[in-house]
């Protein structure tokens, strides 16, 4: 017997908040995104970091020493995993996380003030600049936060906690009329 | 409790991001050590008033195990070191 599995986004049914309305501060939720964990083998931290730094499109999110999330908009999860496993060979463990993680992209002039309600790090660009990323708590939820623009941040969260984080972000953004919608 | 911990990998973070895993000064005895030695290691803990070394794990950050040296009375934190570095130093 064959079973058909349908991929369903956990925020389906909650989004869009108000169809067609996009405020200056906006929460964009990509429907599909390739997310892969790369963990350097023992003693290979610098070698793996050097290889990852040469890649152009997929963006790199620091998780901890010798561990990264690699995120790509254009590649499929399988494609990204395969190409990373190929270039990194024996130096790292590469694992597809695309089904287990959700990306939320927050942008607008007030994003720092919105995030400051849930995040305990300094988000000033001189401290947390473009390309910076870190695992941290947003409220009670573990996220990977990255600065992807001057006024743009991406949060990567476990699929099972996406609704919780989405509700928190809505509340944090309410004073700025934060809007939310899917993209891609 | 000290409310801000300077993680060597992530920077200054609130203590809520960490979980305390206990005394870092005890050393695991050899497998064939006496029952008394194992009993000491597993169950007996001092409750120091002052400087203390503890294992802390940065569960909501880099997920690394750290050794935090702090004062249990004044909440001063003296040092935070990656657990692997401490183990290497101790020859473990
Ligand atoms: Zn850390």
Image: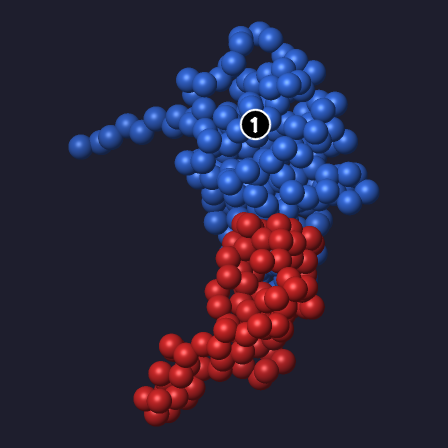
Chain A pictured colour: blue
Q: Where's residue B30, x and y in %?
A: 41, 88
Above or below A71: residue B66 = below
Above or below B33: residue A52 = above
Return the residue found at the far right. A126
- Looking at the image, which residue is at 47% across and 44% down? A96
- Looking at the image, which residue is at 63% across and 33% down? A117
Query: Where is residue A161, by image quadrant?
Result: top left
Q: Secondary structure at mark 1?
A: helix
Query: Where is residue A124, by image quadrant?
Result: top right
Q: From the viewer's side, name the closer residue of A181 and A127.
A: A127
Above or below B30: residue B46 = above
User: Does residue A30 appear anywhere in the picture?
Assistant: no
- Looking at the image, which residue is at 41% across and 36% down? A160
Residue corresponding to mark 1: A169
Q: From the viewer's side, name the closer residue of A47 and A87.
A: A47
- Looking at the image, which residue is at 70% across and 34% down? A148
Return the residue found at the far top. A20
Q: Where's residue A70, x and y in %?
A: 59, 44
Above or below A37: residue B46 = below
Q: Chain of mark 1?
A: A
Query: Where is residue A11, by image quadrant?
Result: top left
Q: From the viewer's side, name the closer residue of A30 and A52.
A: A30
Chain B pictured colour: red
Q: How many marks?
A: 1
The N terminus of chain A appears in which quarter of the rendering?
Answer: top left
């Amino acid at each position: 017997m064959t079973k058909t599995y349908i991929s369903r986004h956990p925020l389906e049914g909650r989004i869009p908040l108000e169809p067609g309305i996009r405020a200056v501060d906006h929460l964009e939720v990509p429907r599909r995104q390739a997310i892969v964990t790369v963990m350097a083998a023992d003693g290979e931290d610098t070698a793996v970091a050097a290889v990852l730094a040469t890649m152009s499109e997929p963006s790199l999110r620091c998780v901890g020493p010798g561990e990264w999330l690699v995120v790509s908009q254009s590649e499929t999860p399988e494609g990204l995993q395969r190409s990373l496993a190929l270039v990194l060979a024996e130096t790292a463990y590469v694992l597809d996380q695309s089904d287990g993680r959700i990306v939320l992209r927050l942008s607008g002039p007030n994003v720092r003030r919105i995030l400051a309600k849930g995040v305990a790090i300094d988000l000033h660009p001189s401290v947390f600049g473009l390309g910076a990323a870190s695992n941290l708590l947003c409220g009670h939820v573990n996220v990977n936060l990255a600065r992807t623009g001057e006024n743009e941040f991406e949060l990567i969260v476990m699929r099972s906690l996406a609704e919780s984080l989405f509700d928190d972000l809505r509340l944090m953004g309410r004073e700025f009329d934060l809007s939310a919608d899917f993209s891609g | 409790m000290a409310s801000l911990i300077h993680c060597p990998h992530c920077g200054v973070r609130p203590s809520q991001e960490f979980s305390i895993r206990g005394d870092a000064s005890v050393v695991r005895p050899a497998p064939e050590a006496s029952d008394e030695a194992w009993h000491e290691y597993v169950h007996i803990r001092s409750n120091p008033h002052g400087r203390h070394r503890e294992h802390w794990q940065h569960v909501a950050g880099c997920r690394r195990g750290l050794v935090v040296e702090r004062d249990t009375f004044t909440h001063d934190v003296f040092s935070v070191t990656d657990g692997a570095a401490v183990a290497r130093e101790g020859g473990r």
